[in-house]
Image: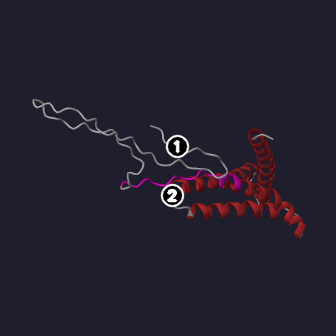
Amino acid sequence: MTERTESAVRLVILLAIAAMAGAAAFTHVHDLSVAHGQPNWIGWANAVAVELMTIYLGLELRARRRVGRPVGLVGSLLVAFALLSLAAQVAEAESSVWGWVVAAVPSLAFLALVKVVLSNAPITPPAVEPDQPDAYRYEEPAEATEVDPVRPTVPVPSVVPAVLPPRAVQPNRPHVVGIIR
């Protein structure tokens, strides 16, 4: 199986689980809201708010980690909304251990997949410090020329190529390192 085919299969599986888990979670949150006195449209609004907040907070957590911002509040909110969704599913289940486990499976499966997908964030390259040694810089030597006694010699500035920060290397991915002049 090629890498492209494997990626496509993984995407189809992710979308299938997301669709089924989302449908179950939306329905349970809606039904619980309506059972506790909310109008039908507010039940759907609650379902949308709870389920999409969980996904949004997961994406926000990833974005904050990528740039090095604090994630404490976002992580706490993510756990709270995930538990709220899970609680709605369990509350709608048959009052038995197996009823609760079976009701929790779609939500737990979706949360596990979201965690796996979001944990594949690219590695942030380290910041380049301004006082790094010039180990990889190359200066062209000045050509020896005859000195004209009438014209003073003017030093020719040597060209220093820009030093770029190292590219992020993703684990399990081949990469090529080289110097381009």
Looking at the image, which residue is at 65% across and 47% down? 173
Looking at the image, which residue is at 50% across and 58% down? 69
Separation of marks 2 and 1 at Cα, in angstroms: 29 Å
User: Looking at the magenta stretch, what is its main secondary structure?
Assistant: loop
Colour scheme shown: secondary structure
What label sits on residue 68 in the rendered view? 2
Q: Position of residue 153 (x, y in %)?
A: 17, 35
Q: Which residue is mark 1?
A: 178
Q: Which residues are magenta?
A: 116-130
Q: Alpha-carbon neighbours of circle 1 within 10 Å: few (<14), some, or many (≥20)?
A: few
Foreground: disc 2 or disc 1: 1
| 93 drawn magenta | no
In the foreground, 27 or 74: 74
- Would you say residue 46 is visible in this rendering? no
Q: Quadrant of residue 82?
A: bottom right
What amino acid is found at the position of numbered circle 2 in the picture?
Answer: Gly
Q: Alpha-carbon neighbours of circle 2 within 10 Å: few (<14), some, or many (≥20)?
A: few
Q: Position of residue 152 (x, y in %)?
A: 13, 34
